[in-house]
Amino acid sequence: MSYLVLLVLDDLDHSHDVLEAWEGAGAKGVTILESTGIGRLRRAGLRDDIPLMPSLSDLFKSDETRHRTLFTVVETEELADRIIEGTQRVIGDLSQPHTGLAFVIQLQKVYGRF
C-alpha cells in the first residue's frame, strides 16, 4: 500500500528544515507548491483587483502572504509517520495555531515509479 503525505506549511521560513526532515525520514521526492487560502486572503483584506473567481496565476501575482504546500507519496505507513514526526520536530505541535495542516491518505492505486 502507498500513502500520500501532504503538509500546508504556515511559516515559509521553516520550508528548508521541513524538506530536510522529510528527506532524512526517507522521502524519495517532494513536490512543492506555492499556495494560499481564502482565510489568508480575507485577513489580508481582499484586493479589489482579484477577480471573484481567481485563477492560480491571479493569486500568485499578488503580494499576499502565502503558504507552501508539500506532498510526497511513500510506500509504508511507518515512513508516513516518520515524516509527520520530523515535521513536528521542526515546526512544533500541529495542533497549535499557525503551524500548518498535515494529513496522510492511504492510496488505493499508484501509477508510475517512486
Image (cartoon, grey):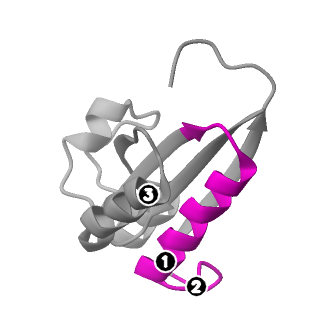
For label 3, the residue is: 22
Give the residues in magenta.
73-97
Mark 2 belongs to which amino acid?
Asp
- Asked if the residues shown at circle 3 and circle 2 are in contact, with their CB atoms under 8 angstroms apart, the answer is no
- Asked if the residues shown at circle 2 and circle 1 are in contact, with their CB atoms under 8 angstroms apart, the answer is yes
| Badge 1 element | loop
The residue carrying pointer 1 sits among few (fewer than 14), some (14 to 19) or many (20 or more) residues within 10 Å by Cα, namely some
Q: Is residue 16 left or right of residue 96?
A: left
Chain-order first, disc 3 or disc 2: 3
Residue 16 point in image, percent of width and height: 25, 63
Q: Residue at x 51, y 64 (%)?
A: 39
Give the label on residue 99, or none.
Answer: 1
Camera-side residue: 27 or 51? 27
Residue 65 point in image, percent of width and height: 28, 63
For label 2, the residue is: 93
Q: Residue at x 52, y 77 (%)?
A: 88
Mark 1 belongs to which amino acid?
Thr
Camera-side residue: 16 or 60? 16
Q: Residue at x 31, y 42 (%)?
A: 59
Chain-order first, disc 1 or disc 3: 3
Give how far apart the Cα atoms at labels 2 and 1 are: 7 Å
